Image (cartoon, rainbow, N blue to C red):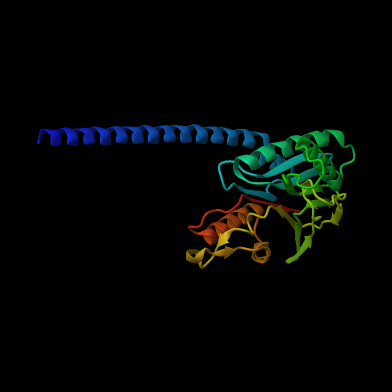
Amino acid sequence: MEAQRDEIERQKDEITGQRNIAIAQRDEIAHQKKEITDSIHYARRIQQAVLPPPKFLSDLIKENYFILNKPRDIVSGDYYWLAERDSQIIIAAADCTGHGVPGAFMSLLGVTFLKEIMGKIKELTANEILDELRKSVINALHQPGVQNTTRDGMDMALCIYNIDTLELQFAGANNPLWLVRDQVLTEYKADKQPIGFYEENKPFTNNIIQLNKGDAFYIFSDGYADQFGGPKVDEGGKKFKYSRFKELLISIQNEKMPVQHDILLETIEAWRGPLYQVDDILVIGVRV
């Protein structure tokens, strides 16, 4: 009997020891997770600090715009960029390789290079800005232009809006621009190449568009159209898709731009339902 008691005590001590180890490991994991999360939250503050404040546009075009920026994670691989020179407003919507922390690092590169490029170019053209940005990204990422080179980079829609002449320049790296006029949506296609290494890099195309009062134009990443959801979320849902996105934008043309922002956000949230947000979402709209 005494031997049995000793064995039971030994087993109890062993179980207690294993439980203490498990608790210590749990606490260590929780501590490490908190440190990582705190670091990412701080990275978000840095990312937001380098982005132009939305007030930048409101000072120039009042409430005739919106920026819907909804990261999938704490930090985002999508970013917007704004600048102004001589009655010209430069507006860009970019989608970097990856999301979360890797995408956020790429976005900081993009913002830094765009600021440098603006200081170098005297006569602003949308395609030249993308050409110069591509050179900077390739050099920074050491992409020599050979097979098996990493495909890091970004897709981007960039436009230059002259608020005096109503002329709009647009250049796109995989991402288009949509113009809505009199309830008709026209798509200005992007060049099928990224900002980064590509087997057949060509100069980007500059599209010149004469705007009319009342027109609205939109640039965006692919996150909105690619969101899964809909009536069959229990089966994984289906993509929102670009066709539904176009129909939605046409249907809300009578609304002011801040209201359009709210409708777009509410619509995609209702579509997503309980499903996970699959990508960063960025949509920029401007009313002439």
- Residue 52: tell me if it is visible: no
Residue 234 location (% of width, % of height): 47, 65
Please tell me which residue lies in front, 265 or 106.
Answer: 106
Q: Is residue 274 left or right of residue 286?
A: left
Residue 81 location (% of width, % of height): 72, 42
Please tell me which residue lies in front, 257 or 11.
Answer: 11
Q: Quadrant of residue 179?
A: bottom right
- Residue 109: tell me if it is visible: yes
Residue for point 74% across, 54% down:
175
Q: Is residue 270 left or right of residue 151?
A: left
Q: Is residue 5 left or right of residue 280?
A: left
Residue for point 85% across, 52% down:
200
Please tell me which residue lies in front, 112 or 103.
Answer: 103
State whether residue 158 is above or below residue 140: below
Residue for point 62% across, 45% down:
99
Q: Quadrant of residue 139?
A: top right
